[in-house]
Amino acid sequence: MTTIPSELAGHPVIIGGGVAGLMTALRLAPRPVVLLSKAPLGMEASSPWAQGGLAAALGDDDDPALHLADTLGAGDELCDADIAGRIVRAAPAAIEALSQFGVAFDRTADGALSLGLEAAHSRRRIVRAGGDGAGRELMRALIAAVRRTPTITIIEGIEARRLLVEDNAITGVLAAGPAGPIVFTTQRVVLATGGVGGLFLDTTNPEASFGQGLALAGRAGAELRDLEFIQFHPTALDGPDLPMKLISEAVRGEGAVVVDETGRRFLADEPGAELAPRDVVARGIWRRMIDGHRVFLDARERPGADFARRFPAIAGFCRAAGIDPAVQPIPIRPAAHYHMGGVAVDTAGRSSVAGLWACGEVASTGLHGANRLASNSLTEAIVCANWVAESVGGTFAGRARKPVLMNLPPPPDPSFVRPIMSRGVGLLRDDEGLREAARALLALSSRHGAASDPATVGLMIAVMALRRQESRGAHARVDFPRRFPVARRATLRLANAIAAAREIDVPTLPAAQRA
Ligand SMILES: Cc1cc2nc3c(=O)[nH]c(=O)nc-3n(C[C@H](O)[C@H](O)[C@H](O)COP(=O)(O)OP(=O)(O)OC[C@H]3O[C@@H](n4cnc5c(N)ncnc54)[C@H](O)[C@@H]3O)c2cc1C
């Protein structure tokens, strides 16, 4: 039997308990809000795994204009410069707000924030915590803060399976709980469901991060943007663990170099070498691997003996895999890591569906463009949570409409989707591989089984990747190696993706943009 908790009717519902969801809930307080998380807070989210930190122009030699220039450079002309400027300018205040919420950032002996360097940043501007434990510390402090806020109703172990929509407006959330279906009657929903790495075999994301928010938004009719842009992190530990453990960019920032099994530093001739943008480093490593080599991160000289003190968590999981980074090169391979695309939102986080907002990795604000600058994502989530909360709080809910109920879809399972995505929609893409993937994903998506939601997300990504007949940022087409002279962002609705995939045997899909 379906439960409809009437005492919560009309309250805004946040779906997701990572930094984006927690911070939005805190910013909404003291207005009442419901926070849903399918896992206990702190579990099955990317947020606690963040190692590097948050980017903010706080150094004496830094300025938000420099942070913006680096962000736009990494984004390969696809960022929205206006929104990116707003976010980087708000970043220093967001760090201060986090300190107020009790986040203990790393500081120098004189109490100033200690700032790290990461790839493609022209200044030291990464605010860290616990050396390489920024996400863990952020989550510790934010979870404690939401738990002591009486107006936040936290419901863990509940998975949102469908958004209920009428006339392009939210009327509720259909979720699965331990005792069966639950319907939350609400006209305001914030998606904060994280990324899509769990759609791939090699990923640094929790396996449950397979873009469920995009399936929810897509099925609700929302517009999605730039889904083809998925960042593959160049340096995941090539060990036994799945998801793969991440060796933070900060290790290269401190001087570690990438070598093959012969000791050759094969990226040395690339502009920026190991600290070039992530997509460049990841593709360089991937091509070397395709040529039959093994690839390693060599930290023996720098940071060398200091490794375990500087990067305690990374040293710990390397040791668990039998590697001492101070004396042995670390085996690495690229892994799906971050989704630049997402639900198309405006500066207040509003989507194209009335009453639906998105925040954090599931959203496409325009900050990241075709490639995310390292450590800009936590910053984006924290800054935008504030704007989303203002917008949600300032939106008149009106009278709750009784939602039209539907059957609860089955629990989603991405395991059939992972090999398809990894083969056809990975680091290097081409027309044939993308078509094959789209065909297989369409079949799984239309069966309404456990693979349907993950396949639907994969399908939308594959169709957008097929349409973008250029290589830009993280989207690399071996059959279209050049960029269009003019960069254009692209949007899609699920219905268009399905229609396009049905025509997949037509020789060439209409390109969304051409030179
Ligand atoms: C290993 C690693 C290291 C990283 N390091 C950094 C870094 O140093 N700096 C940086 O800026 N970024 C980093 N990132 C990226 C950053 O951590 C993420 O982009 C960010 O944490 C995303 O936060 P989020 O709140 O949007 O999503 P998440 O933290 O992934 O949280 C998503 C939440 O949604 C819930 N959820 C999902 N679907 C449903 C559903 N249907 N119903 C209910 N709940 C649902 C999940 O259970 C979870 O609570 C890293 C990522 C990884 C994986």
Image (spheres, rainbow, N blue to C red):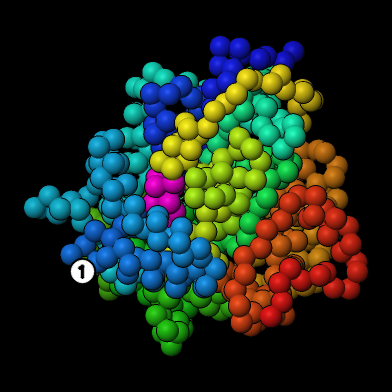
Locate residue 495, reporting x and y percent: 80, 50
| Residue extending farthest left | 110
Front residue (pair 16, 290): 16
Q: Is residue 61 left or right of residue 406?
A: left
Residue 293 falls left or right of residue 152? right
* Magenta segment: 376-385
Front residue of 448 and 92: 92
Q: In this rendering, would 20 be left or right of 144?
A: right
Residue at 30%, 41% in the rendered image: 98
For image coordinates 20% across by 56% down, the residue present is 114
Indicate the position of residue 89 as horizontal and vertical percent values: 33, 57
Residue linked to disc 1:
61
Q: Would residue 328 be seen by someone viewing this image from the given angle?
A: no
Above-or-below relation of 190 to 108: above
Q: Secondary structure at mark 1?
A: loop
Residue at 62% of width from left, 70% of height from top? 488
